[in-house]
């Protein structure tokens, strides 16, 4: 039993290091990145954080609801994947932020918000390249 538990902790530590590297890499891509988080398919936050010194637009409860909405939307769209292929990313633009969602391996998702003036095309390309290298 101890060996099995130790292996689970070992793999979690490896994921934590990878998630930290992914988070850090994305935060350092551009000063307009506001928030980066990795969530599992149930919406639980695995790793992430917010850029220091920026204003939160949502309360903690509304952040939780927003993450749930992101996943619900992703799974709704992905029900057509057999016909149109698997989703690579989703984006939504609001007056105050842009929101990006990317699937990661093993049922994780990368959720990023940026300032609204972020160039979506080049940013998405940078994120897809970053994910591929992890």
Image (spheres, grey):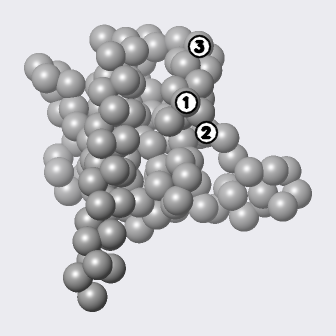
Q: Position of residue 99 (x, y in %)?
A: 45, 34
Taking the spot 29% from the left edge, 61% from the top edge, the residue there is 10
Please tell me in which quadrant of the rendered image residue 79 appears: bottom right
**Residue matched to label 2:** 89
Q: Earlier in the sequence, mark 1 or mark 3?
A: 3
Give the quarter of the figure containing the N terminus.
bottom left
Closer to us: 117 or 101: 101
Taking the spot 37% from the left edge, 12% from the top edge, the residue there is 30
Please tell me in which quadrant of the rendered image residue 18 appears: top left
Closer to us: 73 or 13: 13
Q: Position of residue 107 (x, y in %)?
A: 52, 60
Tell me the crowding category of disc 1: few under 14, some 14 to 19, or many 20 or more residues within 10 angstroms, Cα based.
Answer: few
The CA distance from mark 1 to mark 2 is: 16 Å
The CA distance from mark 1 to mark 3 is: 17 Å
Reply above or below: 113 against 78: above
Q: Earlier in the sequence, mark 1 or mark 2?
A: 2
Frontmost of labels 1 and 3 is 1
**Residue matched to label 3:** 122
Q: Position of residue 55 (x, y in %)?
A: 16, 26
Q: Is residue 121 left or right of residue 25?
A: right
Tell me the crowding category of disc 2: few under 14, some 14 to 19, or many 20 or more residues within 10 angstroms, Cα based.
Answer: some
The CA distance from mark 2 to mark 3 is: 13 Å
Frontmost of labels 1 and 2 is 1
- The label shown at residue 133 is 1
């Amino acid at each position: 039993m101890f060996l099995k538990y130790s292996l689970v902790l070992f793999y979690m530590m490896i994921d934590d290091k990878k998630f930290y590297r992914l988070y850090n890499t994305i935060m350092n891509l551009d000063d307009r990145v506001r928030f980066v988080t990795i969530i599992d398919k149930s919406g639980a936050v695995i790793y992430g954080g917010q850029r220091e010194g920026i204003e939160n637009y949502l309360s903690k409860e509304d952040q939780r609801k927003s993450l749930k909405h992101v996943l619900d939307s992703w799974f709704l769209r992905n029900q057509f994947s057999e016909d149109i292929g698997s989703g690579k990313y989703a984006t939504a633009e609001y007056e105050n932020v842009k929101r990006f969602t990317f699937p990661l391996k093993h049922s994780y998702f990368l959720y990023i918000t940026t300032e609204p003036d972020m160039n979506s095309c080049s940013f998405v390309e940078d994120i897809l390249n970053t994910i591929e290298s992890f």
